[in-house]
């Protein structure tokens, strides 16, 4: 965020010391406007706004299924159920409304927190899960296909005057900073961020000296990025592509744009399904890694001509654009698994298009003026969450254990009258170790321990040949 963009209000917000009570975001009698989509939703002001409350029973079963695959988070729930360390604190969350997220929400509630929730992507909400949470009296404002009221939902969670934030992509934090900076600076004790794209945004904000409260980088925990980003994205992206297309992957030229953790996950799983994987990159070290991992590396201009399936995982905009569409084969399938829908330039694709139709759920056929057809999955949004169910519960178990423990950390510091600096804060290595150990235990896997002699050896700087 450029410094010159700061408003006077935002500048004044920093460094003030007002009591929390005086920091009501809105006057007490504030009545929010209804959502634009009103008539098509189940809306109870101040309580919930979901697609269809009657789906609650189905949602509860989905959540139970996730609970039985998330042992670490469930163990944390049991541990904190009695002591309720989060009592008196309100968390506003803005994260995909999936069955796994519901397990996290229930765990916060069990630990005593008040929680208000919105989705972080227009296409990732599971309507049955949202209904189940609403039926459990958890304020939730989220539905699948929420394009028009996305920020309206985030604002509704702010009506609950949160003192903690939980983000996936930083939309909630951005809303607070841009529209309620005084509240952000004084009433919010801290937040947590789930994903790489959000962390990038927050680092940019912190570098500009514009971050108003500490945000713990959950994404950067080893037990998050080394598992969720790689194996979670790998499996769920392939799952999304298959649900949207049902095509055979074996023998196809599968182009993965970006060889970060997510791209690597997609590439190794696509190879496992028998695809010929081609990687495109802009970073030399990442391209080298892909090459030495056995993948073919090409510039997108060349990959565009031979790819059958394209998947972007870069976090960068316009990775697939006009000239690439123009050179693609007839029938090429294009999708994205990055956080925002900016990686495939659909505006330029539309300029080349004669007509368009939905051919299957989450699969749109674009008939180009050059006579070829191109298929776009999930409107270029996260294909793994829009066309499938997001990452498997087993891997979200560790990501969300990190979320839960980080929120507890913020609250415990607050109780001691301490506050972390307004920066992007790393996860302590002990937290990673604890989560990894607990995960292994729940999987019934035992590991070795260093002997005293080995410990001495690895710390002995004189040891040589
Ligand atoms: N993600 N959540 C799920 N099943 O709840 N699946 C994926 C789920 C998160 C994941 O942690 C990633 O960092 C983020 O979505 C991208 O928006």
Image (cartoon, rainbow, N blue to C red):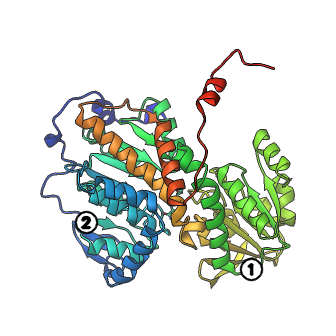
Give the vertical position of 179 relative to 143 (above or below): above
Circle 1 — which element?
loop
Q: Which mark is residue 365?
A: none
Determine the CA span between mark 1 and mark 2. 44 Å
Q: Residue 247 carries which label?
A: 1
User: What residue sits 47% from the left and 45% below the top?
Assistant: 434
Total count of labels: 2
Quarter of the image where the C terminus is located? top right
Percent x, y for residue 75? Answer: 39, 57
Percent x, y for residue 114? Answer: 24, 56
Q: Nearer the viewer, residue 447 or 109?
A: 447
Q: How crowded is mark 2: few (under 14 residues within 10 Å), some or many (20 or more)?
A: few
Q: Residues within 10 Å of mark 1 (few under 14, many from 20)?
A: few
Percent x, y for residue 266? Answer: 70, 60
Percent x, y for residue 441? Answer: 51, 55
Lower position in the chain sequence, tag 1 or tag 2: 2
User: What residue sits 12% from the left and 58% below the top?
Assistant: 29
> Could you tell whether 274 is left or right of 400 in the image?
right
| Residue 115 in sight from this viewpoint | no
Give the vertical position of 14 relative to 434 (above or below): above
> Could you tell whether 180 is left or right of 238 in the image?
left
User: What residue sits 37% from the left and 72% below the top?
Assistant: 130
Q: Mark 2 points at which residue?
A: 33
| Residue 274 in sight from this viewpoint | yes
Q: Nearer the viewer, mark 1 or mark 2?
A: 1
């Amino acid at each position: 965020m450029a410094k010159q963009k700061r408003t006077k209000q935002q500048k004044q917000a920093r460094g003030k010391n007002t009591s929390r009570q005086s920091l009501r975001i809105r006057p007490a009698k504030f009545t929010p406007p209804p959502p634009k989509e009103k008539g098509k939703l189940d809306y109870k002001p101040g309580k919930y706004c979901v697609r269809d409350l009657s789906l609650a029973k189905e949602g509860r079963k989905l959540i139970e299924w996730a609970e039985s695959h998330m042992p670490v988070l469930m163990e944390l729930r049991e541990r904190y159920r009695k002591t309720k360390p989060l009592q008196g604190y309100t968390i506003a969350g803005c994260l995909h409304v999936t069955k796994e997220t519901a397990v996290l929400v229930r765990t916060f509630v069990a630990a005593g927190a008040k929680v208000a929730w919105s989705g972080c992507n227009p296409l990732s909400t599971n309507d049955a899960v949202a209904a189940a949470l609403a039926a459990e009296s958890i304020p939730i404002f989220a539905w699948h296909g929420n394009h028009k009221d996305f920020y309206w939902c985030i604002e509704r969670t702010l009506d609950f005057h949160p003192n903690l934030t939980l983000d996936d992509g930083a939309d909630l934090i951005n809303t607070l900073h841009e529209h309620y900076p005084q509240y952000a600076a004084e009433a919010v004790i801290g937040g947590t961020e789930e994903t790489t794209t959000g962390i990038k945004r927050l680092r940019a904000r912190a570098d500009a000296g514009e971050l108003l409260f500490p945000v713990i980088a959950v994404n950067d925990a080893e037990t998050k990025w080394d598992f969720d980003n790689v194996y979670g994205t790998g499996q769920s992206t392939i799952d999304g592509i298959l649900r949207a297309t049902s095509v055979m992957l074996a023998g196809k030229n599968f182009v993965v744009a970006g060889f970060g953790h997510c791209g690597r996950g997609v590439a190794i799983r696509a190879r496992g399904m028998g695809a010929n994987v081609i990687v495109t990159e802009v970073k030399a070290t990442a391209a080298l890694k892909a090459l030495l991992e056995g993948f073919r590396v090409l510039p997108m201009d060349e990959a565009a001509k031979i790819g059958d399936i394209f998947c972007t995982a870069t976090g960068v905009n316009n990775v697939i654009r006009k000239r690439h569409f123009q050179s693609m084969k007839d029938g090429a399938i294009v999708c994205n698994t990055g956080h925002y829908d900016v990686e495939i330039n659909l505006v330029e694709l539309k300029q080349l298009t004669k007509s368009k139709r939905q051919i299957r759920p989450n699969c749109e056929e674009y008939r180009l003026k050059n006579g070829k057809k191109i298929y776009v999955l999930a409107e270029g949004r996260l294909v793994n969450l829009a066309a499938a169910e997001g990452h498997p519960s087993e891997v979200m178990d560790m990501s969300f254990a990190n979320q839960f423990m980080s929120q507890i950390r913020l609250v415990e510091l607050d109780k001691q009258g301490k506050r972390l600096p307004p920066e992007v804060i790393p996860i302590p290595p002990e937290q990673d170790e604890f989560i990894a150990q607990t995960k292994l235990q729940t999987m019934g896997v035992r590991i070795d321990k260093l002997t005293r002699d080995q410990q001495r050896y690895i710390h002995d700087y004189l040891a040589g040949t």
